[in-house]
C-alpha cells in the first residue's frame, strides 16, 4: 500500500479543512477495523490529513486497555503489511505514524446491546465532534443508533455527530425501509453516512471524471452509438469463513443492489448539475429508478461446484464450512436489464458477479455498434472487430480502448488493436486501501461518496422482483467463467460475454 503524502492528497483533494473530531468504532476488535479502518487512518496520518486532536475510541466486548488494543492491532498490521495479497500491504510500516492514529486511543470494554456503554460514551465525549462507525454485523445497526439516540449522543449542539453504516443496508426493500426509519428516528439524513466501499475505490471515482471532464466520451455515450454495456465483478475467492452469512444472502443481494449498481449508476447517470452531494446522489437515484422491471427470464443464478482454480482442486460451495449440503444459495448472478430513459432506451446492460470464477476482475465494457457498412470488406460478424471502451477497475486499474488499425502490408487489411492507460504506470502509485477518501469525506461532512436512502430504495426495488424461488441455481465448476446458462442469456441476443482474463 505505501502511499506518499502527495499521492494521497491527489486522491482526496484538499486534505485540510476537517474540524477536530473523535472516531468511535463499534466492533473495534473485528476484521473490518483491522483490515480496512485502521490501515486507512494510517494512510491519512501519512498524508497529514487526520483532523486536529484526532482520537479513536474503540468499543468492543473483551476487557483490555487502549494500549493493549492498539498493540494487538499494530501486531496484526505488521503481519498484513508484509502480505502482498492483503488490502494493507505496506512495505515500510512506520511506527511513529501508527502512533499518531492510536497513541490517544481509548478503549471502552462493553456490550453495545446494553445501555451502560452509551452512558460511558456520553461521559467521555462531552461536546466533541464525533463519528460513530458501526463496524459490526448489520443486525446491530438499529440497536446502536437507538442506544446513541437515547443517550443524547446524536444531538448536534454546537458540534457534529455522524453515524457511519456499513453494508448490507437491509436485505430487501422492506427491511431497508425499516432500517432507514429506525435510523431516522434517531438522526437526521445529514448525519447518516451509508458506506458502499465501491464508491471509495479510486478507479471507480475515476469513471465520473472520465465521462464528465472529457468531451471525447460524452457525445457518444448514448443509444445511437452504444450496442450494449457489460459490468463484471468476478472473484476467485470462495465464501471462505462466511458460509453462514452467505447462506442467508447469496451473490445477488451481496453484490448487485450495492456494488454493481454503484458501477451502473456511475457509468450511466446523467451529468449532475454540480458536485454537491445532493446533485450527484439525485442523478444516481434517477438512473436506478429508470431500470425497467427485470423479469426472471433475464436473470441467471449459479452455484460453484468442485473444480480447479490456478491448478489447485477446490471444493464446491455445498462443501464449504457453514453451508447446507443441499443449499440453493447462488454464488453467481447475472442479468440483462434496460434503463428506460432517452439516453439508454433499448440498450441492454448485462451484469454478472460470482465467486470462484477463473479470474479476479472488476470492469465495465462499453461495446459500441459496428460501422454502418464494411468499406474494407471486414467481416462484421467477427467479434474482434469494433470499438470497446473498458474501464478496468480492480485489481488492474485503467482504461483501454479497442479499435481497428491497418495491418501493415500491401493490402487494406484490418487489425483489431488495443490502447491501454494504467493508473499504476502513469501515476506510479501503489493502491491504497480504499476507505481513505470515505473516512476523510465523512470527517469533512461531504456525503457525495455515500449512498442516500433513496438510492438504496431504488436499488432494492429493482432487484426485489427478479428472483423466482422455483428456479435452482445452475451449477458451474469452480475456476470456470460461470454457468453456460449465463452465456445463453447473451447468445439469444447475438452477443457474448467478454472473457474474464
Ligand atoms: C463485499 C462482499 O461487500 O464485497 C464480498 O460482501 C465481496 O462477498 C466483496 O467479496 C468484494 O469487494 P472487493 O473490494 O474485494 O472487490
Image: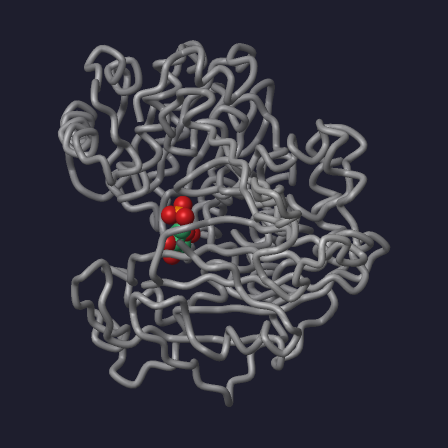
Q: Position of residue 317 (x, y in %)?
A: 28, 73
Q: Position of residue 228 (x, y in %)?
A: 68, 59
Q: Is residue 140 visible?
A: no
Name the residue at 52% across, 21% down: 12
Q: Position of residue 91 (x, y in %)?
A: 21, 23
Quadrant where the N terminus lies? Answer: top left
**286 above or below 331?**
above
Q: Is residue 120 visible?
A: yes
Q: Is residue 212 left or right of residue 424?
A: right
Seen as rendered, the residue at the extreme front is 410
Judging depth in this view, the residue of 1 and 194 nearest the camera is 1
- Location of residue 40 by image quarter: top left
Q: Position of residue 236 (x, y in %)?
A: 32, 57
Judging depth in this view, the residue of 498 and 347 nearest the camera is 498
Judging depth in this view, the residue of 327 and 310 nearest the camera is 310
Q: Is residue 453 left or right of residue 480?
A: right
Amino acid at each position: 500500500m505505501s502511499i506518499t503524502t502527495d499521492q494521497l492528497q491527489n486522491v482526496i483533494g484538499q486534505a485540510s479543512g476537517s474540524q477536530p473530531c473523535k472516531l468511535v468504532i463499534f466492533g473495534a476488535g473485528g476484521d473490518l477495523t483491522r483490515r480496512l479502518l485502521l490501515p486507512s487512518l494510517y494512510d491519512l496520518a501519512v498524508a497529514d490529513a487526520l483532523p486536529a486532536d484526532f482520537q479513536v475510541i474503540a468499543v468492543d466486548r473483551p476487557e483490555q486497555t487502549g494500549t493493549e488494543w492498539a498493540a494487538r492491532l499494530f501486531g496484526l498490521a505488521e503481519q498484513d503489511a508484509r502480505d502482498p495479497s492483503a488490502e494493507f500491504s505496506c512495505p515500510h510500516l512506520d511506527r511513529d505514524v501508527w502512533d499518531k492514529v492510536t497513541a490517544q486511543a481509548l478503549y471502552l470494554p462493553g456490550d453495545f446491546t446494553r445501555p451502560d456503554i452509551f452512558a460511558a460514551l456520553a461521559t467521555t465525549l462531552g461536546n466533541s465532534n464525533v463519528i460513530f462507525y458501526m463496524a459490526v454485523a448489520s443486525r446491530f445497526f438499529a440497536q446502536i443508533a437507538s442506544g446513541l439516540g437515547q443517550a443524547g449522543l446524536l444531538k448536534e449542539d454546537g458540534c457534529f455527530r455522524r453515524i457511519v453504516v456499513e453494508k448490507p443496508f437491509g436485505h430487501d426493500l422492506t427491511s431497508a425501509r425499516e432500517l432507514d426509519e429506525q435510523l431516522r428516528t434517531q438522526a437526521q439524513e445529514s448525519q447518516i453516512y451509508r458506506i458502499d466501499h465501491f464508491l471509495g475505490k479510486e478507479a471507480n471515482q475515476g469513471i465520473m471524471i472520465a465521462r464528465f471532464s472529457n468531451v471525447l466520451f460524452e457525445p457518444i455515450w448514448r443509444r445511437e452509438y452504444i450496442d450494449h454495456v457489460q459490468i463484471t465483478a468476478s472473484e476467485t475467492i470462495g465464501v471462505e469463513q462466511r458460509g453462514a452469512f452467505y447462506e442467508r444472502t447469496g451473490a445477488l443481494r451481496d453484490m448487485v443492489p450495492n456494488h454493481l449498481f454503484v458501477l451502473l449508476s456511475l457509468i450511466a447517470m446523467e451529468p449532475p448539475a454540480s458536485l454537491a452531494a445532493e446533485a450527484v446522489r439525485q442523478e444516481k437515484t434517477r438512473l436506478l429508478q429508470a431500470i425497467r422491471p427485470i423479469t426472471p427470464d433475464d436473470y441467471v443464478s449459479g452455484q460453484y461446484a468442485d473444480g480447479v482454480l490456478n491448478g489447485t482442486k477446490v471444493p464446491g460451495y455445498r462443501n464449504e464450512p457453514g453451508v447446507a449440503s443441499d443449499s440453493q444459495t447462488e454464488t453467481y448472478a447475472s442479468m440483462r436489464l434496460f434503463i428506460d430513459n432517452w439516453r439508454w432506451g433499448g440498450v441492454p446492460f448485462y451484469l454478472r458477479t460470482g465467486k470462484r470464477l477463473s479470474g479476479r476482475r472488476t470492469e465495465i465494457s462499453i461495446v459500441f455498434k459496428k460501422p454502418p457498412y464494411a468499406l474494407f470488406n471486414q467481416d462484421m460478424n467477427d467479434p474482434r472487430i469494433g470499438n470497446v471502451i473498458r474501464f478496468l477497475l480492480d485489481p488492474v486499474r485503467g482504461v483501454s480502448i479497442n479499435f481497428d488499425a491497418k495491418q501493415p502490408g500491401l493490402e487494406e487489411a484490418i487489425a483489431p488493436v488495443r490502447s491501454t492507460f494504467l493508473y499504476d504506470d502513469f501515476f506510479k502509485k501503489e493502491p491504497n486501501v480504499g476507505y481513505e477518501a470515505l473516512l476523510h469525506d465523512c470527517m469533512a461532512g461531504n456525503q457525495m461518496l455515500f449512498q442516500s436512502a433513496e438510492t438504496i430504495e431504488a436499488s432494492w426495488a429493482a432487484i426485489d422482483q427478479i428472483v423466482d424461488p422455483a428456479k435452482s441455481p445452475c451449477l458451474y465448476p469452480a475456476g470456470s467463467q460461470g454457468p453456460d446458462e449465463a452465456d445463453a442469456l447473451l447468445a439469444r441476443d447475438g452477443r457474448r460475454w467478454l472473457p474474464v482474463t
